[in-house]
């Protein structure tokens, strides 16, 4: 497995800190591998390491409480500073109390989890200023290229647009095997995990909502609009139920939303948000007859790549026209428009017209899958394949 240095370099300064290191992200995005890579670096200076994987029933069936975890660590640690790695710790009831105690005992504590509630509620309030959090995601294209090279395989941009970046899928040699893995993954982490975790009774309604949302990535929604679409299929539900189900999907890192930002009002418009999938495979496995939604998946891919580059993102409303992303970092702003192609005049006029009246001091970018360079004096056109290999859009100068 490749060294995911993009993430590890952010965690490395905290190896010896008394801050609890919280590593989160959707299941199967590679958190456990990153944990192993961190352990490998720490083993170069000490073997005083204890690792517990709470998805391993041989472990979780014997460590069933905070006290049991504390006793287990005490029995396996050595003298001196101990490094604790607690994988998928949300499976343990009372894990918050155990982590607080272990931290106070002088251990360097690393935990992973696949639910954003790790960073909310009483635990976050009580440990305010005493933890650091790191979000891990499925592979972006640069990582895919590195990993497939290691595996002596190839991966095209189109493959990425359709089947996304869950690391494990690249180990399978056939598309049939990859699809079986992705469908099983979807059944486990998108449906079964959430139904069981939240004791969802309206299973049919929840599954219909999941299918609707994941097939509608890169679109602006409100809970009301989703409710109306679901209800139009003669499945009664409330807006509050829809909001609750959407929260479950966000908490599990399956979807992510960004708010709109209005040029006119200079403020966020929180009621309507744009929803993106953690991985575009969630859309593609739901598409019948190989009619993949490459247009919206392309925008979703650009979203994932910009987030990987550490940009804060908004949808930007510019005099009634939508710019896909206002990307902000280091006091710099980039207006980014995404389209599959602008070869046709109508598409060209629509996409470039979204930038109308934005001052020329701001950097305006359009990303498409076209081979021809459509850059103008005011707008920088980037070919998708070139964008996917960039470390940062600031590299444009």
Image (spheres, rainbow, N blue to C red):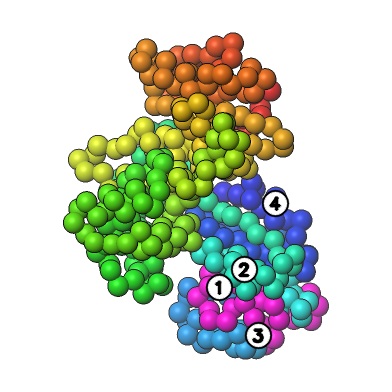
- Between disc 4 and disc 2, whose residue precedes? 4
> Is disc 4 surrounded by few (<14), some (14 to 19) or many (20+) residues within 10 Å?
few
Work out whether mark 1 precedes mark 3 in sequence or the reverse, and give the earlier one.
3
- Identify the mark nearer the N-term, 1 or 4: 4
CA gap, disc 2 to disc 3? Answer: 14 Å
Image coordinates for residue 39, horizontal then vertical, percent: 66, 64
| Residue numbers of the magenta segment | 73-101
The residue wearing badge 4 is 10
Q: Earlier in the sequence, mark 4 or mark 3?
A: 4
Q: Are marks 1 and 2 in contact (CB under 8 Å)?
A: yes
Among numbered discs 1 and 2, the one appearing first in the sequence: 1
Residue 377 in view (yes/no): yes
Residue 55 in percent (x, y) is at 48, 73
Q: Is residue 82 magenta?
A: yes
Residue 22, image quadrant? bottom right
Q: Which residue is mark 3?
A: 70
The residue wearing badge 1 is 89
Tell which of 71 and 191 is nearer to you.
191
């Amino acid at each position: 497995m490749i060294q995911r240095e993009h993430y590890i370099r952010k965690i490395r300064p905290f190896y010896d800190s008394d801050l609890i290191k919280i590593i989160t992200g959707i299941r199967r995005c590679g958190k456990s591998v990153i944990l192993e890579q961190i352990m490998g670096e720490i083993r170069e200076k000490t073997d005083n390491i204890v690792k517990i994987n709470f998805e391993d029933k041989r472990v979780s069936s014997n460590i069933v409480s905070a006290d049991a975890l504390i006793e287990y660590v005490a029995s396996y640690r050595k003298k001196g500073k101990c490094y604790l790695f607690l994988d998928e710790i949300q499976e343990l009831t009372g894990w918050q109390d155990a982590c607080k105690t272990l931290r106070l005992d002088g251990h360097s504590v690393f935990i992973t989890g696949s639910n954003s509630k790790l960073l909310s509620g009483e635990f976050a309030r009580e440990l305010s200023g005493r933890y650091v959090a790191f979000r891990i995601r499925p592979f972006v294209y640069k990582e895919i290229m590195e990993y497939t090279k290691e595996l002596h395989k190839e991966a095209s941009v189109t493959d990425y647009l359709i089947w996304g970046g869950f690391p494990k899928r690249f180990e399978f040699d056939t598309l049939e095997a990859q699809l079986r893995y992705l469908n099983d993954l979807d059944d486990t982490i998108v449906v079964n995990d959430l139904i069981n975790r939240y004791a969802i009774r309206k299973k049919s309604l929840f599954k219909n909502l999941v299918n609707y949302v994941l097939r509608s990535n890169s679109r602006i929604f409100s809970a009301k609009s989703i409710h109306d679409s679901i209800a139009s299929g003669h499945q009664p539900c409330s807006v509050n139920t829809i909001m609750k189900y959407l929260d479950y999907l966000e908490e599990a890192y399956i979807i992510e939303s960004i708010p709109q930002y209005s040029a006119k009002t200079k403020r966020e418009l929180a009621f309507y948000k744009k929803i993106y999938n953690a991985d575009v495979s969630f859309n593609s496995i739901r598409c019948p007859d190989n009619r993949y939604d490459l247009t919206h998946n392309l925008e979703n891919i650009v979203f994932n790549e910009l987030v990987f580059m550490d940009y804060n993102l908004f949808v930007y409303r510019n005099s009634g026209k939508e710019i896909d992303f206002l990307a902000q970092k280091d006091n710099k702003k980039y207006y980014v428009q995404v389209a599959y192609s602008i070869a046709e005049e109508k598409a060209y006029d629509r996409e470039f017209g979204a930038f109308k009246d934005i001052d020329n001091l701001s950097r305006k970018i359009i990303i498409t899958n076209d081979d021809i360079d459509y850059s103008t004096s005011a707008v920088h056109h980037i070919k998708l394949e070139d964008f996917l290999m960039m470390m940062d859009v600031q590299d444009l100068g």
